Image (tube, rainbow, N blue to C red):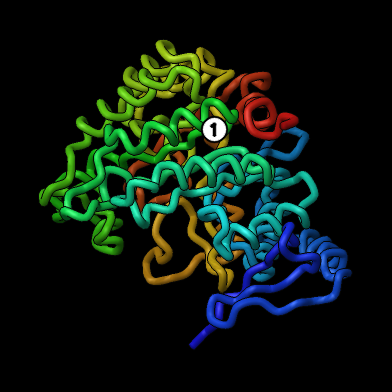
Amino acid sequence: MNKTTYLSPSRTHSKNMSLTTSASGSTTLPKGLLLSLSLLLSCASTPTPSAQVEAPMHLGEPVIDSHVHISPNMQALAVALEVFEKSGIGKFVVKSAGPVGTPRYEANLAMEKIMAGRMKSFINIDWQGIDSPAWSDLQVKALTQAKADGMVGVKVFKALGLGVRTGDGKLLSVDDPRLDPIFETCGKLGLIFAWHIADPVAFFKAPIPDNERYDELKIAESWSFYGKDFPSFNELMEAQERRIKKHPQTTFLLIHFGNNAEDLSYVDRLLTTYPNVYIDISARVPEFGRHPANEVKEFFIKHQDRILFGSDFIVSFDGKMQLGSVWHVEGEEPGIDNAVEFFTRHWRYFETDAKQIDHPTPIQGKWKVDAISLPKDVLRKLYVTNAENLIFKPQ
């Protein structure tokens, strides 16, 4: 059986750095390991450029990717850093640090130390024990520990509302009062609540050949939320807004373009109505890119202080990559050059006025998009400033 190796940081209960495996626990390593790992990663982050890769298209400074998922081990991090180096990504934000106290969480803290300010992280909620009367209190304690450890927020996946079930077999409702302390504590502690509550509308329709996302759904069958006891897309959007309205002191980062990239007017209304709401663009260029370019451009200019660049770039423990969607496209795993092209298509969309270009993830829709040529001051906010002000600000 393959072992998963994590980086694990020193904490109050352990004076030494250790590598922890999911199968065999932890092994104490020399105190100088962190320095050695740092040097090794420094070498890994400056790969030899590939002649086949188009040069990055962006402003003359590194872009902050506010939405990535990098498994906390050396192999995954080395792959990610090579892609970032060739794509023009500087700082990055891991949205999957795991629940507080887990091996993944401990390893993620170690990775942050190695990155020395280049990386920030969001924790995830542990849904186990949801029926216990003590569950909410345990989550509040975990959030308090996460804040003390330097975490900047909580990322809640679409499992809330679409996957997590209570003891009676029913889906946990977004409005369940057991969740109230989590939202409120995030507000009190200044932790950002990053939320993925729903997928594109097509995922809530029958996964048949007529579905415009059928190519994707036939590979990732679990992404279909058609039928059964799943709430509708509109019900989830209504629940999302109820939570935002109920917790005005909590900062919400609605990822995937407010979870409703196909409806610019809906996202515009959220941003206009609720000053505590931000969005990112991760994995949704295909959706909002279908709107007329002038309308999208106007949207980005109007809300220029509230939109963050994010890619949803994933690197697993074995170094395999996911480029905003499923692992395999046409039976092939993406390589470094594919990943660089993935980012380059983002730069092309935001920085040029090219017509009918390929969007970053073709399997997310067999259509072309028109680029929006954002002004440089708006681009800088999208690429750098907004993430600096929201996520990388001093704690």
Q: Quadrant of residue 238?
A: top left
State the residue in front, 255 or 288.
Answer: 255
Residue at image position (47%, 22%) is 277
Q: Most extreme residue toward the front, as rendered?
A: 133
| In the rendered image, the vertical position of residue 332 relative to residue 355, given as above or below | below
| In the rendered image, the vertical position of residue 265 relative to residue 204, given as above or below | above
Residue at image position (25%, 34%) is 236
Left or right placement of residue 192 versus residue 62 in this view:
left
Image coordinates of residue 310 in percent, x first then y, are: 55, 40
State the residue in front, 277 or 381.
Answer: 277
Q: Quadrant of residue 202?
A: top left
| In the rendered image, the vertical position of residue 158 relative to residue 245, given as above or below | below
- Disc 1: which residue: 192
Image coordinates of residue 200 in percent, x first then y, are: 29, 40
Q: Quadrant of the C terminus?
A: top right
Residue 116 in view in this figure: yes
Image coordinates of residue 350 in percent, x first then y, are: 56, 31
Q: Most extreme residue toward the bottom, as rendered?
A: 1
Image coordinates of residue 96 in percent, x first then y, are: 53, 52
